[in-house]
Image: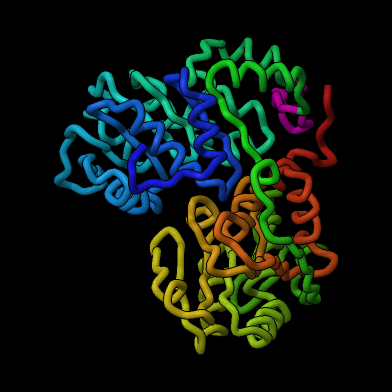
Amino acid sequence: MNKCLQLLTHQIEALEETKQFNRVAYYHDMGLGKTFTGAEKLHVFNNEYNLLVCQKSKVNDWVEHFKEYYPELNVIDYTKSKAVIDKGVIIVNYELCWRRPELMSLRNFTLILDESSLIQNESAKRSKFILKMLPKNVILLSGTPTSGKYEKLWSQCRLLGWNISKRDFYKRYIIEQDLHIKTSPFPIRIVVGYKNVEELKIMLRKYGANFLKTEDVLELPEQTFVNIEVDTIPSYRKFQKDRIVTIEGETLVGDTALTKMLYERMLCGHFNKNKLQAFADLIESTDDRLIVFYNYNRELEELQKIAKNRPISIINGSVKDLDNYNKHDNAITFCQYQAAAMGHNLQKANKIVYFTLPLSSELFEQSKKRTHRIGQTKSCFYYFLMCKNSIEERILDTLKKRKDYTERLFIQDDVFFS
């Protein structure tokens, strides 16, 4: 172990328990420092070549991690246009990885996937590319490897060396049914449950998976959830009735289940002046650091106007600016779910505001862990700005059950199971 690196007890134990495996998965809850565990396992393997694939927003964090704790290693940021393959640790993001075919020539190397759940769709280009690689060692890191959906685990099983076919995997562990839609002659095969789950976990451990939940390791501060109810606007109620409404010069037409859901969410978000006022009242009530999760760019525009007198930081697909978050105790950090819910350490704050909710259970669970993690010493508060008697209440109820809300789109009046 590197002399300048002091691992925690649970990290040392995880490394010891997986000592005999050259393909491992550290499925450790968010906030337990799997970055340190995974990097140390890579260091123990001691390969000349190493490839680390992560989210784009995490590339610089990984570069800095290896430079700080393993200065003897050559670190290559392969997102740079002039970067070349060399001995050391090659770091690239998922979106760019499959666009670099020269990486396929790597041999006798260690592959480490940060947030390995991102290859759960084996038909995606990045997943196909990674599954075709020939690493000597594999390290998978994820706090939510399946989000409770075991059908999404098959590609990770393959990387761990479990050569079970997808058909056999589904036959043994997944319960499916045909969903018939009256408007279509072809049924849709959907997952309705799971079987032999304990056996599946035993098999995963047999192939190097190490599971760890926060409550098994340490006591983090208390979590408090607060619903702030606001009234829906007349336009929302009209849209529910007619599926069409004009607001602020825009005509919203909910002619499909998807567009209806999209516009209902918007009418509960940036179009809702009651919610915008509730957000203004909330930030006026405290000078503490706040993390604010949102979905759409229009929401960010409105929220920034309201918070214009406070120091602002932003994390989204275009910007990662945490200067004010780091410098000012009263900063407000606006976080778009896909860009910020995973991988960021925001425990300087202990209050999260949900202006609107995500549809993904994984993003929801990950977002809560941005503040509730190692290093947090204060109680954590979560404020949900909720439109009464609206789609938002249904979304929150679904997320609390660790399910994606999009699954409800399939449950309509014109479908039946067989």
Give the mark count.
0
Colour scheme of this structure image?
rainbow
Let me know if residue 369 appears in the view.
Answer: yes
Q: Is residue 229 above or below residue 34?
A: below
Q: What residue do we see at 70% from left, 67% from top?
A: 381
Q: Is residue 190 above or below residue 54?
A: above
54 or 8, nearer to the observer: 8
Q: What residue do we see at 75% from left, 24% from top?
A: 194
161 or 317, nearer to the observer: 161
Which region is colored magenta?
A: 175-191
* Quadrant placement of the N terminus: top left
* Quadrant placement of the C terminus: top right
Q: Is residue 412 above or below residue 277?
A: above
Let me know if residue 355 appears in the view.
Answer: no
Query: Does 181 appear in magenta?
Result: yes
- What percent of the width, then of the height, locates residue 170? 66, 17
Horizontally, residue 113 falls left or right of residue 363, namely left
- What percent of the width, then of the height, locates residue 257? 71, 49
- What percent of the width, then of the height, locates residue 181? 76, 31
Horizontally, residue 107 falls left or right of residue 188, namely left
Query: Does 78 appear in magenta?
Result: no
Q: What residue do we see at 74% from left, 33% from top?
A: 183
| Predominant SS of the magenta segment | strand
